[in-house]
Image (cartoon, grey):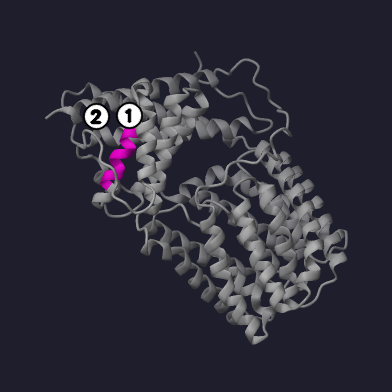
Amino acid sequence: MSSATPFAGTPRVRRLPLAGVLRLGRPSDIWFKPALSVVVAVAPPNLTLLALGRLDLAMYTMAGSLCALYAHHRPYAARARALAGVVLGMVAGLGVGLVAASLTGSAVVLVTVGALVAAVQKVLCDATRIGPPGHVVLTFISSASLFAPQTLAQVPGHLALALAAGTWAWLVGMAPGLFRPHGPERRATAHALNAAAAYAENRRPHASGTAHAAVQAAWQTLLSAGARSETRRALERLVVRAEVALAAPADADPHRLRAWARELRGTGPVPRTAYDSELLGVEAELAAPARRWWSALGPLAPIAMRTALGCALAGYASLALGIGRPYWALVTAASLYQANVTLTWSRGVQRVVGNLVGVLVFAAVVPLAHLGPAALVLCCLAFNFGAEALIGRNYWLGSICVTPMALLITEFAGYQEPGRLITERVVDTLVGALLGFVAAMAVTNRRAGDRVEHALAAVERARARAARLLAEPQPAPGSLDSARRALAAALVDLRAGVEAASGEWWQRALPQERVVRAEQAGHRTLAATIRHHRAEGARP
């Protein structure tokens, strides 16, 4: 049978969904952390500028302060590196925008630069897997700076303001580590235990995929956390218990799994588990060369092309319509692009709905904001908090706060006529969403199918290695643990690749039968490695 045997009836052009696009989900268990962090990061610089009477400089400090939105799910060792990279990336994007603004007054050239920068930011954020809010905040700042009146002599000072605020945001992001140094690892482990418990109670395919992804995320978190302290070793053993529950759900105790997850809240001791044998192979994985993020750039080329084309078209159309802030249309287009066309469509619907409701909120709040500069700053802080508190439930809900916040930020430099702001924002939202989605459909992504083929090959190699080690009478210490984690990671990547490719238009038929066989064989082998681990752990 051909390895590319398609699933019968696989549509080449798929319907774009409407049902469920605006449905609210459950908030993140740490929704308040980015919400509070961004307020703490934004407030001191803005209040300082308010006291100095220089709110016109707030755009530059906001660039650095908004870096506090990133990396809240990462362990602190990894968070320090990620936040530093975000701050440098933010300052670099701002610098490109300010230099371009100082060198040319051509709006067409500035939109072109903004589109190219947005594409680079999108690709870098996806390749490094920086996580929410992704490239959108970076693109908002760099695109807005393109249309800020500027001279070359002013650029160093403005970048220094952004870097100083970014340093403060870095400190804000790292501060919780003083009180809960293992907080991210404990949350990731608890999430894996709860997901495994849910699968043990309700053995549906969707629950299985969610649980395996949660376990893999927990391993990635632990492996990026730095030195293996006793606390982290205990957490690793709990993740293995989640793996055991996935391999043998009928024998699992969901209540015990959830009890362990509850005990991980706070700073109490990590619960001990039966057969607390030493985990082997982790040191070898930590010592192995890490996968370089730039290896993911090639597959992201179609997404980069979509972003550049969509942002450019949106900006040019806004200029043709006489809109004074074409970067709003550009940012709207940039915010749409997700893993595939179907998800991009859903994000477009969410963006339009959220922005349209958001301008109504702005119209209601603007009289209060116009009471004075202090009221303006406080309103922006409130919307900062609201955006991060709500966006985890659905993107459109958070956009209701993001939109008035963005409109109010334009008033830091001086009074703006509300009616014109509202009209331009509505037009730019519709133009950006429409042309951004047109670009997504125009640029096909054939590489999504290639990713599935590569993921299938990776699963087959990882399964063969694990099966070979299982057949050995005495595999090398730690080798089977390492092989099990590699196979689990390959299976998660395969499922993610299939889901991404399934949402693409004009995509060749996927090898569904081969995917199903590979997943079934892979999960059987995973179960066998878990049984082997339990047998080894039970030996005196």
Element marked by disc 2:
helix
Could you tell me if residue 286 is visible in this image? yes
Residue 157, how many percent across, how many down? 59, 82
Which callout, 2 or 1, points to the residue nearer the camera?
1
Q: Which residue has dot 2 on it?
A: 533
Q: Residues within 10 Å of mark 2 (few under 14, many from 20)?
A: some
Amino acid on which the number 1 mark rests in the picture: Val
Q: Which residue has dot 1 on it?
A: 244
Element marked by disc 1:
helix
Most extreme residue toward the bottom, as rendered?
A: 52
The picture quadrant where one finds residue 358 is bottom right
In the image, is 352 to the left or to the right of 464? right
Magenta span: predominant SS is: helix
The answer to whether residue 236 is magenta is: yes
Q: How many marks?
A: 2
Picture residue at 39% right of the left edge, 48% below the top: 265
In the image, is 266 to the left or to the right of 118? left
- The mark nearer the N terminus, 2 or 1, is 1
- In-front residue for pair 271/70: 271
> Measured along the vertical axis of the image, is residue 41 above or below residue 425?
below
- In-front residue for pair 288/169: 169
Residue 326, how many percent across, how many down? 78, 62
Q: Are marks 2 and 1 in contact (CB under 8 Å)?
A: yes
The picture quadrant where one finds residue 534 is top left
Alpha carbons under labels 2 and 1: distance apart: 9 Å
Picture residue at 27% right of the left edge, 44% below the top: 234
In which quadrant of the rendered image does the C terminus lie?
A: top left
The picture quadrant where one finds residue 14 is top right
Residues rendered magenta in the picture: 233-242
Residue 485, how many percent across, how many down? 34, 36
